[in-house]
Amino acid sequence: MSDSVQKTIVCPHCGQKGEAQTWPVVDAFEDPEAADALLSGTLFDYTCAGCNTTFTLDFDAIYVDDYARSRVRYARRAEDRADEERLVDEMPAPSHLDPDDDRPYTSRIVDSRDGLREKAALFRDGLDDRAVELIKASAFDLFESRGEVDAGDIVRYGGQTEDGALLLEFIGDAGVRETEVPRSSYDALVARELPADDVVVDAAWAQRAARDLSDQDESEE
Ligand SMILES: [Zn+2]
């Protein structure tokens, strides 16, 4: 199931009214163009026909990717995000599954448009977002200890190199800086038993999970 909804927008610059297409649900199977727009960061863009200004709309959106066996829901409002169970229950059921494919289905809730884009990209690339969040957190800690990033900077998944290394983008006042993490670091995390029941897998999740993993390492020594 996929649908777009027309919304009337009044341009804040010139006052011209226009129709914007919004996507409560983006189904990668049924709407590959909308999925590509999400991945390239333009899904939320609206360009005014009167003054040609492009600005960013904000609407709740669900990304469904049955190939990648994943769903991601962006909920704008904190009070909505507090009810994780309902948010997950209300997501469209998978409808294009290969019956022979028994990989688990992943559901996630995010609190930003860019978080939605990032999860969609990760899942499309066949990655485990838990391992990537852990890698992001440890790369951030390392850069922060060297004074190379500020506490308010964010780090995002930025794709993969040809040999499978992960690209991370550090985004801050100084601009965007990219770093590469070897595939072996990712593979080592995927091989571990990572917490499986959480639907919010973000930087705070990674800090908790990293503590749990290091506790396990210590008790095994
Ligand atoms: Zn305008």
Image: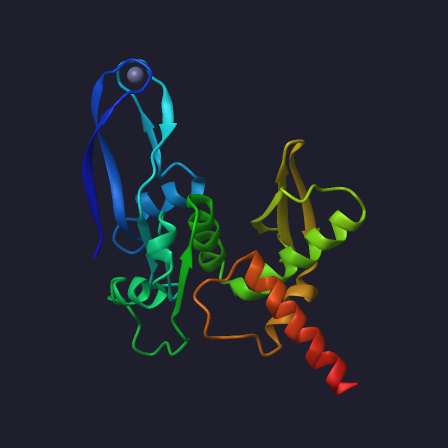
Name the colour scheme.
Answer: rainbow
Give x and y (percent) for residue 26.
Answer: 29, 50
Q: Is residue 188 visible?
A: no
Residue lying at the far front in this picture: please name it.
79
Q: Quadrant of ligand 1?
A: top left
Residue shown at the point (79%, 50%) measured from the top left: 145
Q: In the rendered view, does 68 fall on the left or right side of 34?
A: right
Give x and y (percent) for residue 144.
Answer: 74, 48
Give x and y (percent) for residue 129.
Answer: 52, 62
Q: Which part of the image, by quadrant, shows the N terminus? A: bottom left
Q: Which part of the image, by quadrant, shows the C terminus? A: bottom right
Residue shown at the point (29%, 13%) measured from the top left: 14
Give x and y (percent) for residue 135.
Answer: 65, 60
- Seen from the viewer's position, the closer of residues 72 and 204 is 204
Residue shown at the point (57%, 75%) measured from the top left: 194
Circle count: 0
Q: Is residue 216 visible?
A: yes
Based on the displayed image, in which of its 4 quarters is residue 104 positioned? bottom left
Q: In the rendered view, does 195 fall on the left or right side of 215?
A: left
Q: In the rendered view, does 156 fall on the left or right side of 217?
A: left
Q: In the rendered view, does 107 fall on the left or right side of 147?
A: left
- Seen from the viewer's position, the closer of residues 176 and 66 is 176
Residue lying at the far bottom in this picture: please name it.
220
Establish if 36 lies above or below 15: below
